[in-house]
Amino acid sequence: MVRRRECSDWLRDGLLMAWPYHTRRWRRERELQLARSPVCEICSSCSDLEVHHLRPLSRAERDRRDDDAAFPGPDGLQTLCRPCHSRVTAGASDTLATKAAGWRRFIDGG
């Protein structure tokens, strides 16, 4: 009985983590971000690019499927290569990500 509940919790958590990344809207936002910024904003790599949320989605935002948090627009997203994204997500390069986002806003005039 306990095992079934643990499995359903795991499945629910996995589905929450997957949202919003498997939605049509996210794919469109991702493509727009990659068109705006086609290189990694930390190391300038052009390969294996991903789109990073500058402010991570909280569990509460995922639970209520908060579109404003999930789709923040260009000021809340950042293009990173997979290695830089992994480091930023792990917290190792948080300062680098913040600096890169600041430079992008400065260059864009925002």
Image (spheres, rainbow, N blue to C red):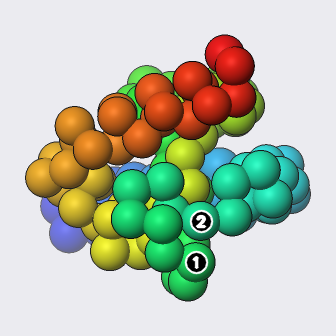
Element under label 1?
A: loop
**Residue 2 seen:** yes
The quarter of the rendered structure image containing the N terminus is bottom left
Taking the view exactly as shown, the residue that stands out farthest to the left is 92
Image quadrant assignment for residue 74: top right
Taking the view exactly as shown, the residue that stands out farthest to the bottom is 47
Residue 58 left/right relative to 65? left
The foreground one among 76 and 23 is: 76
- Tag 1–tag 2 contact (CB < 8 Å): yes
Residue 39 left/right relative to 11? right
Give the amino acid at mark 1: Cys
CA separation in Å, label 1 and label 2: 5 Å
Identify residue for label 2: 39
Total number of numbered labels? 2
Q: Is residue 82 above or below residue 107?
A: below
Taking the view exactly as shown, the residue that stands out farthest to the top is 110
CA neighbours of label 2 inside 10 A, class few (<14), some (14 to 19), many (20+): many
**Residue 11 seen:** no
Residue 64 left/right relative to 27? left
Q: Which label is found at residue 46?
A: 1
Q: Is residue 11 above or below residue 19?
A: below
Residue 33 left/right relative to 11? right
Q: Residue at x 59, y 65 (%)?
A: 39
Q: Position of residue 94 (x, y in %)?
A: 23, 41
Image quadrant assignment for residue 106: top right
The foreground one among 36 and 61 is: 36
Q: Residue at x 48, y 54 (%)?
A: 41
